[in-house]
Image (spheres, rainbow, N blue to C red):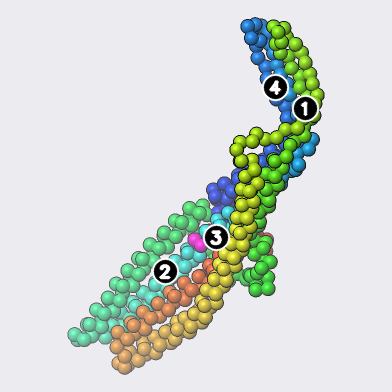
Amino acid sequence: MSLAQAVQQGLSSEPQLRAAMAEAARAATDVRIARSGYYPALSVGAGPKAMDPGEVVYDVNLSQMLYDWGRVSSRVAAARAQQRGQDAGVEVAADDAALAIVDVYLDVLLAQQRLQAVQAHLQRLRAIADLSEARSGGYADRSELERTRLELARGQDQLASEQGTLQEVRNQFLLLVGTEAEGLLEPDLPDLPQLAPAQLPRTVDASPLLRKANEQVRAAEAEVREARAALKPQLNLEAAALRRDVGGRLQNDSTISLRLSMDVFQGMSTFLRPQAARQRLEAAQWNVDAVRREILRTVQTLADAGDALRGREQALLQQAQQAVEVAELYREQLSVGRREVIELLNVQRERLEAERQLIALRIERKRLRYRAAAQVGALQAMFRESAHAG
């Protein structure tokens, strides 16, 4: 199973993503609700006549807004901005869920490779133990054999620890992806040209996190316009038809009129609403700057960490290769009595440690790239391209 396949399968049943999609659908419904302000409003009331339940009185009112200084259009604009923000939120949720799957996928690969390194280390220790047993003749020789057995016991402990770690991450993989972690293919180091210094500002501006923050600004701007419009009277065309009790007799009546109406004034609240809306707008504008700076800071931090790991990778690779060469040389010298077993055991331990660090470093470099891609909303596009190419 490739990483793209694991992500695709995991996202198909991700509850957090489903919740974000439901929120986006609700926001789309809110747009339709806001647009209903353009249409006539109908109210109907009916009931029995007082003291005469056999007679029915009723009241039907139909009102059509003619001009409201942009109040309804502002509500629609705010709802649409919220909808676009929720759509961007779906992308954010998808990238977050995909990144969680990427993390556990890489964790499984890391645990598998470290387990294989420990198993190879144990095989080398058993070969040394066989050599020590063949050399054992006196007290000193027996000490070499016991020392080798001690290293074998430590290796078995490491093996059990790595097996436990592998089982733990396999269980997490099963939970997130819904299938066993079998036949996982290690991905190549992803290439992210959109994170090059020349492209990064444009990439950040197009990221779903920043788009969501920008839509919050647009929604706040619409709320400011709505609050200002609420200070002015609304012109309505109203029609009414009613049947009511007048002097003990039922009278039918109908009217058509133009009417100016305003919201109820309660203290200074009506005049304070525009101020509160402007303050929300200011907060949303500052939030855009904060989100942009946080994305840039995170991406730069991940890039710097990746560069540092690349330098360490070369050093660890050279260290592991030298450990192999030194171990082979020590084995030859041990066979002619020029080296002690303890020296060979120390070299093998250093080799294992270098291999374990090298494995972790290579996986971490890839993890950092995927995290940077998730920050700018490029993770999903990367896997879609991979699936299309496959």
Mark 2–mark 3 distance (CA, rounded to whole Å) = 24 Å
Q: Are marks 2 and 4 in contact (CB under 8 Å)?
A: no
Instruction: Point out which mark residue 193 bears.
Output: none
Q: Are marks 2 and 3 in contact (CB under 8 Å)?
A: no
| Residue found 50% across the figure and 70% down from its top | 364
Instruction: Point out which mark residue 115 bears.
Output: 2
Q: Nearer the viewer, mark 2 or mark 4?
A: 4
Identify the mark nearer the N-term, 4 or 3: 4
Q: Where does label 4 land, which residue?
A: 44
Mark 1–mark 4 distance (CA, rounded to whole Å) = 14 Å
Q: Is residue 104 magenta?
A: yes
- Where residue 388 appears, as percent x and y from the top left, is 68, 61
Q: Where does label 3 land, which residue?
A: 99
Say which element carries label 4.
strand
Mark 2–mark 4 distance (CA, rounded to whole Å) = 75 Å
Mark 3–mark 1 distance (CA, rounded to whole Å) = 56 Å
Identify the mark nearer the N-term, 2 or 3: 3
Rendered view: 314 above or below 225: below
Rendered view: 38 above or below 341: above
Q: Is residue 163 visible?
A: yes
